[in-house]
Amino acid sequence: MSEKVGVITTGGTIGSVLSGSAMTVDPNSTIVHQEIKKICARRSFDVDVVAALNKNSEDLSPRDWVPIIDAVHNFLSAGVTRIVITHGTDTLAYTAAAVGLLFSDSGARICLTGSYLALSEPDSDGPLNLIAAFRAVTSDETPPGVYVGFRNNAKNSQAAIVPALDLKPMGFDALFFQASYGRTLAYYSPKSGYTLDPTYSGASTLKLNYEKITPESVDFAGSALLQCIAYPGMDFSHFNLAHIKAIVVELYHSGTAPSFSGKNTIVDFAKSHSEDIPLFCATFPSMNINTPYESTRKLISAGALVYADLQPHAIFVLLTIGLAQGKTLTELAGLMSSRLFS
């Protein structure tokens, strides 16, 4: 008997069917269960499937990470260390970050996956992505850690295995996910099988210790955070900050944001609020830019925390779960200190 694989389903496109004129989550998860059975029949996997939730991923809030985290923890407690999680694509990067932060050093092999097209569609990438995820967690060549398995071309001829914390959210015009700085552990294709990328140099490291948290505590923590993107003429008077403890700002691709002075600008806000509402700014691309722009220096001088090579959604997830665990913003900033650009 092969080693058991735990499968956690959550809904998403990979668990959806066409209903009328829209894709909707299959209430019984029948279609994804059928596909898992097909894979297991061909590969002789011993599988235990649990449903953590059944929702479109665009409707997930931070509280929905909790049943997924709990399902992973329950499998690990039962000695199951090879785990596949099916998930929708819209917020996959957020959930992957949550699982990666908590379980990357658990000794388990965990792989999230989903699909761009529903399993009921003839050209669905779901079967390829599922097989890639199963191969990733069942291969002893895969270093223990948390990954995402997803096609890396529109032809469904190959899937990439990417470290969870290096996964970039899918762009609106994208057909598949990419990794920051091209960090890809391995590839799977029906023709070539599962092969490690010889240029892989390791995953990004950032972690929180697992602690039991409640959906309510995570919701409360998430509501105290604001995530936004830098935009021309950024004006902080547009934000209602009455209950906000910290702001995560996604910088421009060059690691910059508007740097002119003036009332309610990001520089003005950083100067006047760095103690009570810190600005966590991401991401400064250190591999691509040797010398920062003057605007980046102005942000840092004003009191903003500018992070190199750390994606904003990962910061948001770390702060949310960390606050739910009872940690302070100072403690959580300390966990990211090695990524702080100065």
Image (cartoon, rainbow, N blue to C red):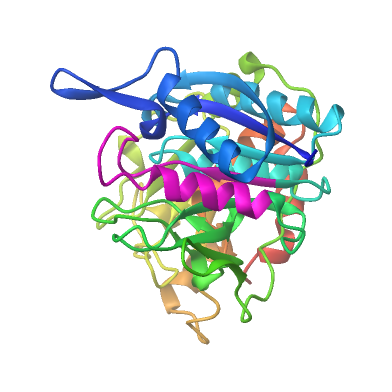
Magenta span includes 88: no
Identify the residue at horizontal 50%, vertical 66% (top origin).
180
x then y, percent, for residue 52: 59, 20
Task: Say above or below: 127 vs 22.
Answer: below
Position above or below: 143 against 298: above
Q: Name the residue rendered at 69%, 17% in the picture.
A: 214
Q: Residue furthest left?
A: 21
Front-most of residues 304 and 2:
2
The residue at the point 75 percent across, 43 percent down is 103
Placement of 15 over or under 176, stated as above or below: above
Q: Could you tell me if residue 268 is visible in this image?
A: yes
Query: Residue 256 sits in which quadrant?
Result: bottom left
Let me know if residue 133 is in the magenta part: yes
Q: Is residue 107 rendered to the left or right of residue 309?
A: right
| Figure check: 163 above or below 198 | above
Q: Is residue 120 left or right of residue 286?
A: left
Q: Residue furthest bottom?
A: 290
Where are the magenta residues, as a range?
110-137
